[in-house]
């Protein structure tokens, strides 16, 4: 099977760079699998899971949120606000964040902005927990 | 003599504090610098992507075009939380003061910035960022969201971020950077890129698929880019702050050393004079017997 290059960049720097066999990423339109010779594409990334298959066939999954993926000339670039491999995820922290934001959302006096903030925090936490569980 | 001695002691105490602050600033500086380096490729790549998308024919996005009817500018002023950093905070405020007009709004970031603009005439958009040390990626996204929303609604027509550029260890320059509208910046940069373009970088071609649409992708990328830029500016500003504090504390140390040297000299002279006087008195006393 042929390989291609993947580069993942977040505000904390470059988190992954190397040869891969395939990558599956959750875009706003649904999961998209990318193999070599994929046509050029740009898509927005939603909250979700990302799966990288290395050239030797081993797969790694990661929580990847907010950003976009671009495929150009056999090179895949993923630029995300957060990108964490499942092995690095802190489950306790995600669960705490989930609980906190749930408690916050129960408060009826919340303004729209605060509600939106708590909701997106809840979604992030839930996504992290899901990815963590999938990895087990 | 006693007065001189206690003076020396107090200067020495101050010197120890400034010395410690210098060391703390140096180590924090290193970290801030690393962070800033890390975020650079992120917003550069975002900008690249925006340029590509715009170039292959998608110019119509509400965040791209100037709004001639909205005259107010929003300044995001990133200053420090503490003083004792030489002219770090004041230089920045002076620069902003030269540019800001009546009716412009401000988002102060950092305690000093909030204190300063709390006393000014300009409207403060949000007071949610009292500590610049606490502003991470999430907070930068919040700021980005606020300015993008305000820009979209037409309340402001320009977004400018004011921060201190880290020119070198010894020189930090206050600077303003225009974030929105993006249009002008992109066009300017285009000429520059075309020269470099021939290089290896693959470019998007017009047959690129956009999921779901170019507009939607842009709508997602631009706010991210803005947040990335803000985060980059915050990191750079904090690197500058630590460098400025380090320089200021270094100068304070030197002054303290100088002062201690002068005071010690004075003290020794006084001691010498006292001994001489005592000897003279004893001799005079012995002679008179």
Image (cartoon, grey):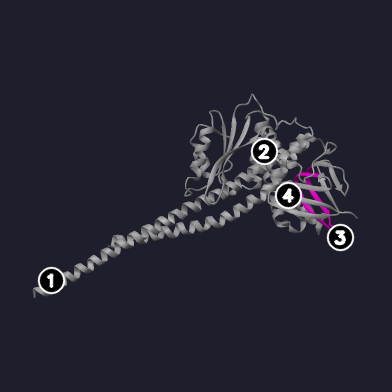
Ranked by sequence position, the earlier of labels 1 and 2 is 2
Any mark on residue B145, and which? 2
Horizontal side of A40 relative to B30 (left or right) equals right
Chain for disc number 1: B
Any mark on residue B284, and which? 1
Q: Are marks 4 and 3 in contact (CB under 8 Å)?
A: no
Residue B109, percent across and down?
A: 57, 42
Task: Assign a secondary structure to mark 3.
Answer: loop
Q: Which residues are magenta?
A: A44-70
Q: Are marks 4 and 1 in contact (CB under 8 Å)?
A: no
**In front of the other: label 1 or label 2?**
1
Residue in the picture at 25% in, 67% down? B272
| Residue, far top | B69
Task: Give whichever of A34, B147 is nearer the camera.
Answer: A34
**Same chain shared by disc 1 and disc 3:** no
Q: Kindly identify which residue carries mark 3.
A: A56
- What whole-number distance in Å separates the C-alpha atoms at marks 4 and 3? 23 Å
Task: Give whichever of B104, B279 is nearer the camera.
Answer: B279
Q: Are marks 4 and 2 in contact (CB under 8 Å)?
A: no
**In front of the other: label 4 or label 2?**
4
Image quadrant holding the C terminus of chain A, namely bottom right
Dominant SS of magenta comes to: strand
Residue in the picture at 54% in, 52% down? B169
- What whole-number distance in Å separates the C-alpha atoms at marks 4 and 2? 21 Å
């Amino acid at each position: 099977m042929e390989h291609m290059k993947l580069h993942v960049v977040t505000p904390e720097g470059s988190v992954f760079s190397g040869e891969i066999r395939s990558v599956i990423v959750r875009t706003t339109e649904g999961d998209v699998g990318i193999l070599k010779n994929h046509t050029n594409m740009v898509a927005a990334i939603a909250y979700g899971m990302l799966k990288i298959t290395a050239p030797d066939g081993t797969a790694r999954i990661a929580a990847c949120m907010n950003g976009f993926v671009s495929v150009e000339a056999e090179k895949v670039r993923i630029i995300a606000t957060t990108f964490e491999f499942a092995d690095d995820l802190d489950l306790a922290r995600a669960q705490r964040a989930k609980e906190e934001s749930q408690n916050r959302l129960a408060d009826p006096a919340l303004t729209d902005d605060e509600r939106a903030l708590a909701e997106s925090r809840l979604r992030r936490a839930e996504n992290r927990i899901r990815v963590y569980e999938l990895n087990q | 003599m006693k007065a001189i001695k206690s003076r020396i002691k107090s200067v020495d105490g101050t010197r120890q504090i400034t010395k410690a602050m210098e060391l703390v600033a140096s180590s924090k500086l290193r970290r801030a610098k690393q962070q800033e380096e890390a975020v650079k490729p992120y917003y550069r790549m975002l900008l690249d992507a925006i340029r590509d998308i715009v170039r292959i024919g998608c110019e119509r996005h509400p965040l791209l075009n100037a709004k001639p009817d909205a005259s107010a500018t929003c300044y995001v002023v990133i200053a420090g939380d503490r003083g004792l950093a030489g002219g770090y905070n004041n230089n920045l405020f002076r620069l902003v003061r030269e540019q800001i007009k009546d009716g412009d709004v401000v988002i102060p970031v950092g305690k000093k910035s909030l204190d300063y603009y709390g006393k000014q005439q300009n409207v403060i958009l949000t007071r949610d960022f009292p500590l610049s040390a606490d502003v991470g990626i999430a907070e930068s996204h919040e700021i980005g969201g606020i300015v993008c929303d305000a820009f979209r609604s037409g309340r402001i027509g320009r977004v400018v971020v004011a921060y201190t550029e880290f020119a070198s260890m010894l020189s930090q320059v206050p600077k303003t950077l225009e974030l929105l509208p993006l249009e002008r910046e992109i066009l300017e940069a285009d000429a520059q890129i075309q020269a470099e373009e021939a290089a290896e970088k693959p470019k998007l071609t017009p047959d690129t698929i956009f999921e779901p649409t170019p507009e939607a992708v842009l709508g997602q990328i631009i706010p991210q880019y803005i947040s990335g830029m803000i985060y980059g500016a915050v990191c750079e500003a904090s690197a500058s702050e630590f460098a400025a504090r380090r320089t200021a504390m270094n100068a304070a140390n030197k002054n303290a050393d100088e002062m201690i040297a002068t005071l010690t000299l004075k003290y020794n002279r006084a001691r010498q004079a006292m001994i001489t006087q005592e000897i003279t008195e004893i001799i005079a006393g012995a002679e008179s017997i």
